[in-house]
Amino acid sequence: METTVQIDVVQGAIDQAAYYLVTNIQSNGMFRYRINTNTTVKVKPKYDIAHHAGCIHALSRYYQRRPSDITYRAIESAGKYLCKEAIRPIPGESDILAVWSRPDIDNTTKPLQAKLGGTGLGLVALLSIESFYCDLITLEQLRALGRFIIYMQREAGDFYPQYVPVASGRTDKWQSSCYPGEAALGLMMLYERDPSISWLTSAYSALAYLARSQERIASISTDYWALLAIEKILSQHHPEQSFVSKELLVNYAIKICEAILQQQIHAPRRPRYHGGFVQNGRTMPTAAWLEGLLAALSFLPTEYEITKRIRTAVMGGVKFLLEAQINNGDFVGAIPRATGKIRLGRPAVAAEFNRRVTEVRIDYVQHAMGAWMQYLAMA
């Protein structure tokens, strides 16, 4: 992959991001979820177990590239917290486990619930750890998490997004466009560990449903998790995959990539925004979409015109994130929410956005770190 971004610069950014995450794990295994580098801004205490799992996944990938005792201990601590505090059976189904979002931990008034995406990312995290630390969870428990995803899937391939005990179980009350892709990626990683056709069938059914449903609407979801899941499916080579339509998945991936590419900011005179994918300079969407674009580069033919455009877009996005990272001081390695304040719009909206510009959340760091690691792997 041709690049004008120096490899050692990207590796340095990854090292700093990993340092930020491992030094922000508390003694109980929780991350310091959200801080503001402007210490005069009061931060509301929140937590998200799905972001916790995402950070475990990113750190596990980092550890495989650059193993160290401090990273190992951080992953072990965060992994144990996930298993101890979040993984429980669903009522009346002892052989189905889920990753639960608890109101007492999330600091929310929402009821206890198991989110589809949370369990999908829980599988991603735990299977990432297994390659170097196999005593955290059993294969049967991993299968039980996979069974929750299948339990939440409808016959057409789509999902109930949440399981809420006080709402009588599976519910459609709140949707997230990321959940199906997260679930499919978790199932495909489980399939790599435990090659049961049920995991593959469920994952493909979810992605095929998304692909066919997108054919009927004008706007395409910029679902980067779906791109990561498609990459996993297409990287597998087993006879039982004969029912998987590569053409359907690749065409769907191209549509997602096109939707992402249309968002990129081309503004050389505004260097803090140039190369990003959001007009207001937010970093997390850029990092997440870069992860999706880089996943697509692994399976899109090199001769496709869109492949060349993706490569160019990726370089711009990588530079944007490098410019955004904090490189010194008390918050080294952190990725702020946005690269600058906004002036336009309603005063109250602008004030709230500007108050959070200097906010750092663990998933902002995790996604940037993940995108950079993918970039290095391809470079």
Image (spheres, rainbow, N blue to C red):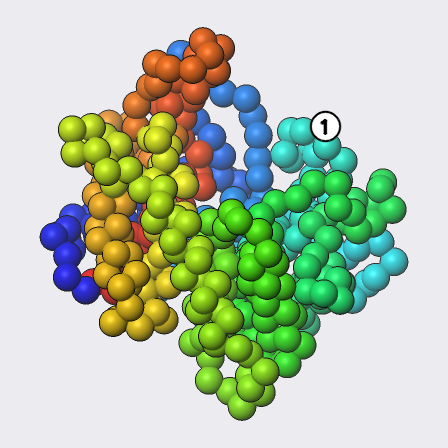
Left or right of residue 293, residue 319 in this image: left
Q: Residue at x 49, y 39 (%)?
A: 31
Instruction: Give above or below for 249 relative to 311.
Output: below
Q: Residue at x 76, y 35 (%)?
A: 111
**58 vs 208, nearest the viewer:** 208
Left or right of residue 227, residue 243 in this image: right
Residue 89: give x, y in percent of width and height.
77, 57
Instruction: Give above or below for 42 relative to 209.
Output: above
Residue 357: give x, y in percent of width and height.
37, 23
**68 vs 248, nearest the viewer:** 248
Q: Which residue is mark 1?
A: 109
Total numbered labels:
1
Q: In the rendered image, which quarter contains the N terminus? A: bottom left
Instruction: Name the kind of residue labelled 1 in the image.
Output: Thr
Residue 203 seen in this snapshot: no
Q: Residue at x 48, y 15 (%)?
A: 349
Residue 191: give x, y in percent of width and height.
57, 75
Q: Secondary structure at mark 1?
A: loop
Residue 179 seen in this snapshot: yes
> Residue lying farthest top?
347
Left or right of residue 34, residue 149 in this image: right
